[in-house]
Structure formats: C-alpha cells, structure tokens
Image (cartoon, rainbow, N blue to C red):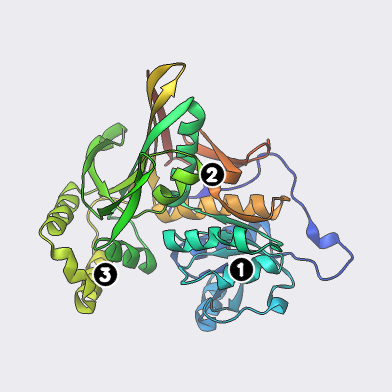
Amino acid sequence: MNSFAAAYIVDGYVDLREDKGTAMKTDIIVVGGYGHVGGKICNQLAIHYPGNVYAAGRSLARAEQFCQSGGGKVKPLRISVEEPLKKQQLERVKLVVMCLDQMDTAFAEACLLAGADYVDVSANGAFFAAMEQLNKRVNDQQGTAVLSVGLAPGLTNLLALKAVQSMDEVQRIDIGIMLGLGDAHGKAAIEWTVDSLSRSFHITESGSARRVSSFTEGLKTDFGADLKVRTAYRFPFSDQETLPHTLGVPSVSTRLCFDSRIVTSAIALFKGLGFDRLLRLKPMRSLAIQLLGKLRVGSARYAVKITGYGVKSGAETLIEFGLQGTEEAEITAQTAIAVTMAVYSSNLPKGVFHIEQLFELDLYETKLELRLKEDENKLSIAAISNIESWTRMNM
C-alpha cells in the first residue's frame, strides 16, 4: 500500500488541552471509524492527536477489534447515528468525522448545537441539501460543518473552484471521474454505486433543472497521460448538485466511467436495454453488490478531469484540470484528514459549508496542497509517487 502524508507545512497547531477551565474539547470521533475509509482516517489522525481519536460505530466489538489491531493508538466507542445523541456525550468532543450515510440531520445538528465541529465524508446529495437548511432554521449553532469531503465530491469541487478562479466568467463545468475496478472499495461505496445505476436525478443546465437517468448521455473525456479518451456517463455525484449555487455556475454535470472500457460499455448497454430496473429487486441487487465486490479486473487507478468553459479577457476560454493516482480510498481519507486538521486548529465561522466555500487547492506534479481561504497555512495531500496532476488552457 502506498504511504501518504497529511501535515502542516508550517507549524502552528493549537494545543487546547492546556486550558484550565471546564472540560476542554479535545477529542475526535470518527463515526464509521473501523470501516474501509474511516480506519485510514483514524490511524493517521492518531499520529497527530494521540489519545484523542475514537473509532465509533454501532458495533463496539468491531471498534475494539479495530483498535486492538492498531496497537491501541485509537480508542473504541459505540455510537449509532440512529439513536438520540445526548449533549453530555459531546462534552469533550471537538470534532466529529462522519463516514456513514444518514437518513436525517438529527445527529449532525446535535453535534453543532453542542459546539462540536463536523466533517462529512459521505456523498448523499439529498442529505447535503437538508444540512444546508440548518443555516436557515438553526440560529444557535456552535460548530462548523464541512460537507463534500473526499475525492468526489471533494477534490472535484475544489478543482471546479480553480476553474472559476481562472476565468472572468464560467458558463459550464464538466466533471469526469474514472474509478479502478481493481481497487478495493468499501461495502457502502459498492452499495451506493449499484443503487445509483437505476436512479434518475436533476442536473442544472443554463440555470434550470433537468431530470436525467444514470449512466446515459455518454461524453468522451480525455483523462490525460496514458488513460487517454474514454466515454463517461451521467452519474448522481452530489458535486453537480452543489456547485451551481456555491460557485454560481449555470451548468454543471458529472460523469463516471471505469478503467475497464469493456465493463463501462457493458453497463451502458445493460442500462440502455432497461435491465437496470432489475436492480430494484432485492435478490438482483444483492447479487450485483456481491459480483461488483469480487470483481477484480483492471487496476486500482482513479482519475478526475474538470473542464471549464467560459470567458477570460474577452475571449472564449476552455480550461482543464486533471488528477490521477491509485487507491481512491486513500485519497478520500487523506483529503478528510487534511480538512479535519485544519478545522480542528482553526477558528472558522459557525454554520454549514461545502469544502469549496472554505478551502482552496494548489496543484503540483506529485502532490496537492489544501489551504483555508485567506490563510497561508497549507496542508499537504501528498502521495510519495502516485499522484499526478496537470492543467491546460485554450483561448
């Protein structure tokens, strides 16, 4: 497995434990912390915040097993997002990292009201929309929530922000995502992918909503380097729901393909023939999840491509940002770690935000640097050798 680093380039951690007042908020709870992505987040955060990181979930036994396997650097905790969260449970909690999908905002709202910051690594557009409503109806929030944290949504949002910052006017943003079928994906991610194949959803075109079906309307996308041009299809990633109002872009779309062209084409054919409706039947859904979980064709590579269309200095302009690497779960975890460390050590405005509303991204050949807007302190999302990025502009 490749090793990653996520750390401040300049010193400046805030040591909250030295306060002599009431019980200080120093703890970090990672809900879903013994899962595929959550476990990576826990282990890395425990290096920077020893004794303050908890792997939480419905199963205390699984949490304990995970913590024992890591030598006890992370502590186990039982928490269910479906059960009411009492304020006293959060007395020492400074930040909660959420790695699970939720049906409602009750858990997140309880965190914010108790003064615990909240970082969400899930990708549920409907949940995000409900979270945004907390800004309108909850006036006494004491914490900061950061949504859209990961690869997609997450880095896709930040690359879209770079496109907006690079032009005087942006009319359209197309997002392409390639995932490797040879990679190890968590069960929740596989279930979401299978369920999404039979979904329809709204996109924003020229400022108006249009309903589309998943894995339709293929678009040829150049992912750069040896990946070259591939056909990607519409998919219900939440970034395309968020970016029209956070960045003011009138048209945004996100499409997906897999590193295996054969599998991508087969799924598109499957969809075109209407067989995706079979996935709504529980036996067929379970079979598809099982097969996709065992499928190991292709590689562990992922790639992201952002194309912005607009105007710069009076001329029509196209700008492209590309990013690729291996092990999607690693880059998702490292993005979450960088955001968590920044939120933990900063005094941010209270309320609910998407990642692109608080952070910016700088690209280098083999690493990314994340920083809070208007802040020179940077955090590195760095692969030793397996992140590559590129930029192109045509006027």
How crowded pointer 3 is (Cα within 10 Å; few <14, some 14-19, many 20+) is rated as many
With 321 as the anchor, is 162 left or right in this view?
right
Total labels: the figure holds 3
Give the label, 3 or 1, closer to the camera. 1
**Residue identified by numbered label 3:** 289
Say which label, 3 or 1, has the lower sequence index: 1
Q: Picture quarter containing residue 223?
A: top left
Kindly report the distance in space between the C-alpha atoms of the residues bearing marks 3 and 1.
32 Å
Q: Quadrant of the C terminus?
A: top left
The amino acid marked with disc number 1 is Glu
Q: Nearer the viewer, residue 27 or 219?
A: 219
User: Residue 13 in the image: x percent, y percent?
Assistant: 74, 49
Residue 177 visible in this rendered orientation of the protein: no
Residue 260 visible in this rendered orientation of the protein: yes
Say which label, 3 or 2, has the lower sequence index: 3
Secondary structure at badge 3 equals helix
Q: Which mark is on residue 356?
A: 2
The amino acid marked with disc number 3 is Ile
